[in-house]
Structures are given as structure tokens and as C-alpha cells.
Image (spheres, rainbow, N blue to C red):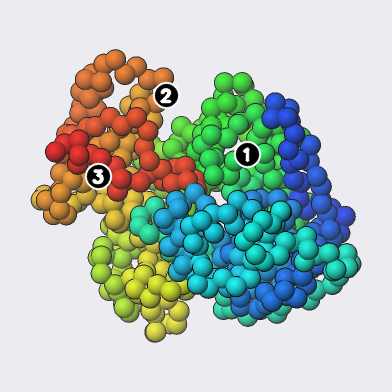
């Protein structure tokens, strides 16, 4: 396939419209009776390209030009696709925040981004007015839908004078030109705006194509909105699922399976929580999904039992892949369910951590000694050897260079490499490299528990206790000051587990922990009804909140 001439990620769309103009680009569910499967509206690559060009001309006429930071708060649908590609074509800078990060964080993120324009549905504008989002900086307001008394214009009004065959030349962008501001989930602190360059996006597209052998003409079911944007760039038809994107753990598996079967979906992305829910349904119904060539799940470690359930629905040769990465750097590593279920899951159950696979091609990955302070300059002496747990640091074209308006956070997360050029990004994750070059994830650096005698890492310890049949998941937290922390294991039981004899489960967990050197000192267990988790994936556990809860319980 011809690579887009410009680094601008939007350049892939007109190229695909040229190569396969009448192929469907996106299918959008039309809301009907919730008890019936939805009908879908279909748009071809030519239609998506034309409408995004028309929208780009309308936005530019209104004053949204190259470099203008523009908040986009529109749910996945035709307008979401056309507006996003229009902003990229202009060279404007979309600011993308997760509505589920909470009102307080949302306001802080939008203030930090200092946007000049705000495009949103009426609900988003109402929240903007009532909560004072970006009041000092926003000058251009566009409503997708009906506009009330908050000023600005509607998207429909802007588009009305623009011809339906309007052409718009995609801005030629350099690799290092800012393309977007994407905010992190904030699972270990305040969300930060990662500055994405056009080169970052283009590298991600090429990396996903290469790693997973994705080809034009395939059908994609993206259950996370941002991943939906990669499908048109990869030449795939994207089926927008009928779901609440802010609650993947509560997705209706019947609707997901129906979409896969209706469109013969070949690729799907789902958070671990969504994969778990669909897998449980599939196991109960004895379902098979023969059209799927691959499923991709990311956002948090995926338990082997969850992988096994979903993998059992796939045909021979199809796998569930679990790429490792972060908002600032994705993908970093990848591994498939075949290798996990046949080999690495057993080491995980024994406290070795979670294997996330080998680094992707073109990425440099090192393990460095654990320090909480900034590291200004790269030095080969920082590197640790195989088997030594340290912080994961990465360098590559898909790695973002800085955070917007957060110089302290940037200094803490980046290590300059003047000797060879570029920089390493500190993932904030701990892990090690095995003798075969695979990377094993051991938890967040901020979550390690430092007692007077030793340092405990969350993922290896939790995996040992997760082998109990009544346990859904666990979270290791430290109570007290680092260096004198008391390790406490918070336990969430499986739904339907017998809770009439928690004392017995407590004794059994003690016995499991006593059988392993790394968990022998974990002797305090607290049962929690439902862990607080991130809204983006419904899978990352907010251990900071659990630590406060545990401290109150034990005080």
C-alpha cells in the first residue's frame, strides 16, 4: 500500500478514498428500540473524505486554523470522524479528554490546555457554561446539534454554504509538528496532556499495520473511541458499536456479538473489562466467532482466565493480543494469547509478573534502576541486567516528547540522550527483561510497597493470591510512610462467590501467601465490595483510593 506523502495522519484518508472510494469506511448505529438490534448508516471512504474536507473548509472559514487548540467533545459517530479528520487536515490541534475522568480533573485539564475553540454536543456546552471550562481562553464555539443561549454557531450553520464537493488540501505536516493533545487517564495522579506529533500518529499507524498484519478491506470493531480513528488510516471499515463508551465493563455482550456476526468483523479492540464480559457470555452460550482474526486488549494486564475464555471463541490461528504501552508511548510491546496460555501464565501465577512480550520493531527499551527523582541525562550505567526489576524506559518514533504546560512532569518523565540524540521516556512502570528478551510487567513504580525489610511489587504479589477460585482480583497497598509501610491486600471476590464464610477464605489466602517468598509478609486482608477503577478501561485499579480506604479500616 502507498504510504501517505505527508506525516499528517489525515493524509491516509484521501489516499484510501483514491484507492477504494466505494468501500465502506464506517458503519454508525441508528438508535431504535433498545430491545432490537440497531440499523446502521453506512459511509464510504469517498464520502468520509469529502465530508471531512467540507468540514475543514467550514472550520477554517470560522477561524479555526493551523495550530489552533480545539476541544472536541462529541460522541463516536459520523460527526466525530469528520470533525477529527477535518481538524487534522487543517493542521489544527484537537484536544481530546475523557469525559469519565471526573468533573474536577476535566476542568483542570481544559484549563491547562488553554484551548481557543470548543466543539461539542449541547450537553458538553451546558457543562462548559455551568462549570466554567476554559472560560478565559475559548473564543470560538461550535455546537454539534441544537444551540441554546451559550453563543457561537452550530456545525450545521457553518456547513450550509459549503459545496458538497468542496476539496480541501491536507496540510503538509512535519514529523515533529504538534497534531493533538491527548490526556492520560490519571490513574496514578493528575491527568497530563501528552503532546502528540504527526510523526507519532503516523508511526503508530505503521506499527499497528506491521505488528498485526492489518490489511485494507478488513472490518474493525473499536470499542474505545480513539482507536476508531486508526481504522480509516489503515484502510479498514470501522463498525461503531452500540454501547456506552464510558462504561465498557457494563457493555451488552449480545450487541457486541451481534455486530461481529452481522459485519463479519475481523479485528476488534476491547478493554480487559469488556473482553471479560463478552468472554463470559460466549462461554455460557457456547459461541464461536470465526470471522475474527485478532482481538486486541490493552489498558491493564489481562488475566489469563479472561484471555482463555475469549480465545476459546476464536478459530485456529486467531489470537487475543495484549499490547503494552501508555498514552505517551503506544505500542511498546506485544504478546499473543497462544504464548501466554501455553507458557507465561504459569510463571505469572508463581509471582514472576505479567509477560507483555518483546519490544516492537524500531523501539529501544531499557530497564533502569528505580529512582523517584528526575534523571536529566542518559548514561549506559543506568541499565540493569536480565532478571533485575527496574523502571521501563523507551525510545522510538511513537514516543511523545513532552506534556503540554507541564515542564516539571516532562522533566520527571524524560531522559535526554545527547550522545545519540533524542530521549527516553520513563514509563513509570516496573519490570524486567528475561533471558529470551521478553519484558515482564511488575506494576506501577508509584504503587510499590516499601517495608522496613523489603520492597514488594504489586502485580507479582497479587497474581499469587488471584489463583484462589473465589477471588476476582486483588490490590496490594502500603499503609504508612515508604520504608516503614505495612502491606495490606484488598480483595474483591467473584460475583456470586460464597461470602458467608470470609474467615475461611482469609485462612486460605494466608496459606497461599505463605507458600511464596514474596508474599509471606502479606498477612492483612481486607474484603472490598467493588474496586474503584478508571472509567476509560474499567480495568486500572485506583490503588491510591484503596490505600486510603484500607488505612481508615485499620485505624
CA–CA distance in space, label 3 to label 1: 33 Å
Of tags 2 and 1, which is closer to the observer? 1
Q: Nearer the viewer, residue 45 or 309?
A: 45
Query: How many discs mark residues in the rendered view?
Result: 3
**Residue with the most extreme bottom position:** 419
Q: Position of residue 188 (x, y in %)?
A: 35, 55
Q: Position of residue 261 (x, y in %)?
A: 73, 33
Task: Please tell me which residue is depicted at 51% across the width and 68% down the height of the picture.
Answer: 135
Q: Answer with the quarter of the image where residue 291 lies.
A: top right
Q: Position of residue 375 (x, y in %)?
A: 30, 74
- Give the residue pinned by disc 1: 243
Of tags 3 and 2, which is closer to the observer? 3
SS at mark 3? helix
Q: Nearer the viewer, residue 312 or 375?
A: 375
Mark sitting earlier along the chain (3/1): 1
Left or right of 80? Residue 413 is left
Q: Quadrant of the C terminus?
A: top left
Task: Please tell me which residue is depicted at 45% across the width and 79% down the height of the picture.
Answer: 422
Neighbor class of circle 1 (other Cα within 10 Å; few <14, some 14-19, many 20+) is some
Left or right of 280? Residue 367 is left
Q: Position of residue 272 (x, y in %)?
A: 50, 41
Task: Please tell me which residue is depicted at 39% across the width and 52% down the height of the picture.
Answer: 187
- Give the residue pinned by disc 3: 548
Q: Answer with the quarter of the image where residue 89 lies.
A: bottom right
SS at mark 1? loop
Q: Looking at the image, is 315 positioned above or below residue 494? A: below
Q: Answer with the quarter of the image where residue 380 lies.
A: bottom left
- Give the residue pinned by disc 2: 495
Q: Looking at the image, is 5 positioned above or below residue 164? A: below
Amino acid at each position: 500500500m502507498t504510504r501517505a506523502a505527508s506525516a499528517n495522519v489525515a493524509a491516509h484518508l484521501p489516499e484510501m478514498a483514491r484507492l477504494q472510494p466505494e468501500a465502506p469506511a464506517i458503519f454508525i448505529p441508528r438508535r431504535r428500540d433498545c430491545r432490537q438490534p440497531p440499523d446502521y448508516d453506512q459511509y464510504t471512504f469517498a464520502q468520509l473524505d469529502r465530508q471531512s474536507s467540507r468540514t475543514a473548509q467550514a472550520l477554517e472559514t470560522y477561524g479555526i486554523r493551523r495550530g489552533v487548540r480545539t476541544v472536541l467533545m462529541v460522541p463516536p459517530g459520523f460527526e466525530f470522524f469528520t470533525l477529527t479528520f477535518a481538524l487534522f487536515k487543517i493542521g489544527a490541534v484537537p484536544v481530546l479528554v475523557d469525559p469519565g475522568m471526573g468533573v474536577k480533573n476535566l476542568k483542570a485539564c481544559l484549563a491547562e490546555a488553554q484551548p481557543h475553540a470548543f466543539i461539542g454536543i449541547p450537553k458538553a456546552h451546558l457543562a462548559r457554561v455551568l462549570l466554567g471550562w476554559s472560560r478565559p481562553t475559548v473564543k470560538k464555539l461550535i455546537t454539534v446539534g441544537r444551540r441554546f443561549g451559550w453563543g457561537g454557531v452550530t456545525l450545521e450553520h457553518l456547513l450550509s454554504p459549503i459545496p458538497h464537493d468542496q476539496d480541501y488540501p491536507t496540510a503538509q505536516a512535519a514529523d515533529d509538528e504538534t497534531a493533538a493533545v491527548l490526556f492520560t487517564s490519571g490513574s496514578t495522579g493528575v491527568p497530563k496532556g501528552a503532546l502528540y506529533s504527526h510523526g507519532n500518529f503516523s508511526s503508530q499507524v505503521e506499527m499497528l499495520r506491521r505488528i498485526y498484519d492489518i490489511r485494507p478491506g478488513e472490518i474493525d470493531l473499536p470499542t474505545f473511541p480513539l482507536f476508531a480513528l486508526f481504522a480509516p488510516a489503515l484502510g479498514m471499515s470501522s463498525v461503531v458499536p452500540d454501547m456506552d463508551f464510558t462504561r465498557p465493563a457494563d457493555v451488552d455482550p449480545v450487541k457486541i456479538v451481534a455486530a461481529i456476526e452481522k459485519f463479519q468483523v475481523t479485528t476488534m479492540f476491547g478493554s480487559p473489562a469488556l473482553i471479560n464480559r463478552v468472554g463470559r457470555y460466549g462461554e455460557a452460550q457456547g459461541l464461536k466467532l470465526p470471522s475474527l482474526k485478532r482481538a486486541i486488549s490493552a489498558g491493564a494486564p489481562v488475566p489469563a482466565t479472561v484471555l482463555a475464555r475469549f480465545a476459546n471463541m476464536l478459530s485456529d490461528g486467531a489470537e487475543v493480543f495484549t499490547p503494552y504501552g501508555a498514552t505517551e508511548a503506544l505500542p511498546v510491546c506485544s504478546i499473543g494469547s497462544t504464548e501466554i496460555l501455553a507458557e507465561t501464565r504459569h510463571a505469572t501465577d508463581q509471582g514472576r509478573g505479567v509477560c507483555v512480550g518483546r519490544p516492537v520493531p524500531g523501539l529501544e527499551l531499557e530497564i533502569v534502576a528505580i529512582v523517584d527523582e528526575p534523571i536529566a541525562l542518559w548514561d549506559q550505567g543506568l541499565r540493569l541486567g536480565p532478571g533485575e526489576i527496574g523502571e521501563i524506559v523507551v525510545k522510538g518514533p511513537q514516543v511523545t516528547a513532552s506534556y503540554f504546560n507541564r515542564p516539571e512532569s516532562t522533566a520527571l518523565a524524560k531522559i535526554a540522550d545527547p550522545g545519540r540524540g533524542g530521549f527516553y521516556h520513563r514509563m513509570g512502570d516496573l519490570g524486567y527483561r528475561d533471558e529470551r528478551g521478553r519484558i515482564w510487567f511488575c506494576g506501577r513504580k508509584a504503587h510499590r510497597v516499601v517495608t522496613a525489610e523489603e520492597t514488594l511489587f504489586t502485580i507479582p504479589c497479587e497474581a499469587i493470591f488471584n489463583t484462589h477460585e473465589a477471588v476476582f482480583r486483588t490490590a496490594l497497598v502500603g499503609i504508612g510512610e515508604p520504608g516503614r509501610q505495612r502491606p495490606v491486600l484488598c480483595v474483591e471476590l467473584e460475583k456470586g462467590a460464597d461470602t458467608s464464610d470470609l474467615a475461611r477464605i482469609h485462612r486460605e489466602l494466608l496459606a497461599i501467601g505463605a507458600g511464596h517468598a514474596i508474599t509471606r509478609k502479606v498477612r492483612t486482608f481486607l474484603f472490598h465490595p467493588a474496586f474503584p477503577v478508571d472509567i476509560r478501561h474499567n480495568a486500572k485499579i485506583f490503588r491510591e483510593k484503596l490505600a486510603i480506604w484500607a488505612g481508615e479500616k485499620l485505624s
